[in-house]
Amino acid sequence: MSQITPVNISIINATTVLNDSEIRPVVEALQKQVSNDFRPVWGIDAKLNFIPGTVSPPEGTWWLAILDDSDQAGALGYHDLTPDGLPIGKVFAGTDLKYGLTWSVTASHELLEMLADPNINLSVLVQTAANAGTLYAYEVCDACESDGDGYEIGIVRVSDFVFPSWFEDFRTKGSTQFDQLNHIQSPLQLLSGGYIGAFDVTSGSGWHQVTAEKRPASPMSRGNVGTRRERRATPRYQWLTSRPHKEIMARAEQYRERVEHMSARLVAA
């Protein structure tokens, strides 16, 4: 096999709900998943580096930021690119914990999808007629994203992911392997709780979610601000660059000092 140059990715602790010791084992498991499971199938590798919240990530690296809530991602301002204009993934650990979901599965999901489609602009056309068809988003974990469909690496649960064959509609049922755990038996099949972004070329009605249950997508899959689903529907020229990490941390410290000062004034009053 030819040499594959790994992508350098900084996994940043920018959350208040997890400490460094809880995140480090997940980073180690994600490294094993990428190098042992994902790389042989997709031909993409990554070198993951854990970055504590007090440390600036190295220049020129992609980011995977572990944040609190999807409606409180102020640490990165809902932005879409690193200060170097490179890809960034976001894991809302606080939201996961709030809904009883496994944040390490979300981290695995976002990491693998960022590696497969870093610019969030790839899709596959399934053509049904000369001027008709459907574009399917090149997202590798959405179809099998449920916690229950994941698997363990050591004690860390990670996301299942589809193979390139999942996007090949000429494949027949059971003709090849379509996902890491072999849960999926046909191309474009969605497991329970799974979904995929689709764009009807004929109507040009824009992106929408197709779900396994044939009903509207749940709030968790509709694309909260900052998620890949939200960004896929946003023109790239509207994406913004994240602020440098030192500035983010300095602003956070200023905010804490201001809150402490106001609290002290209230107590004194």
Image (cartoon, rainbow, N blue to C red):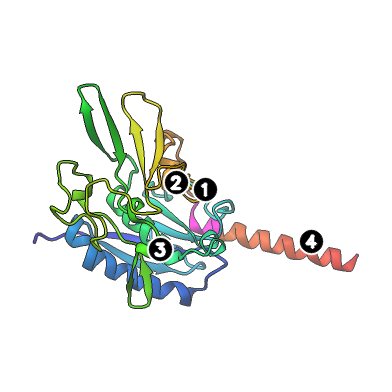
Q: Position of residue 230 (x, y in %)?
A: 46, 42
The disc, 3 or 1, on the residue closer to the chain's N-terminal end is 3
Question: On the image, numbered disc 3 is attached to which residue?
Answer: 147
Q: Quadrant of the image for the C terminus? A: bottom right
Q: Mark 3 against mark 4, which lies toward the viewer?
A: 3
Q: State whether residue 117 is above or below residue 53.
A: above
Three-letter amino acid code of the residue under disc 4: Met
Question: On the image, numbered disc 2 is attached to which residue?
Answer: 80
Residue in view at x 15 percent, y 45 percent: 171
The tag on residue 262 is 4
Label 2: which secondary element: loop
Q: Is residue 241 left or right of residue 180?
A: right
Three-letter amino acid code of the residue under disc 2: Asp
The disc, 4 or 2, on the residue closer to the chain's N-terminal end is 2
Residue in view at x 43 percent, y 50 percent: 83
CA gap between label 2 and label 3 equals 26 Å
Is 246 magenta? The answer is: yes
Three-letter amino acid code of the residue under disc 3: Asp
**Magenta-highlighted stretch: main secondary structure?**
helix
Q: State whether residue 34 is above or below residue 229.
A: below
Instruction: Give the class, few, some or many, for how many residues have Cα within 10 Å of label 1's Cα (few <14, many ≥20).
Output: few
Q: Mark 4 against mark 2, which lies toward the viewer?
A: 2
CA gap between label 3 and label 4 equals 42 Å
Q: Position of residue 219 (x, y in %)?
A: 52, 48
CA gap between label 4 and label 2 equals 33 Å
Label 4: which secondary element: helix
Whether residues under marks 1 and 4 lie with C-beta atoms below 8 angstroms apart, the answer is: no
Whether residues under marks 2 and 3 lie with C-beta atoms below 8 angstroms apart, the answer is: no
Specify the segment rendered in magenta: 243-248
CA gap between label 1 and label 2 equals 21 Å
Question: On the image, numbered disc 1 is attached to which residue?
Answer: 219
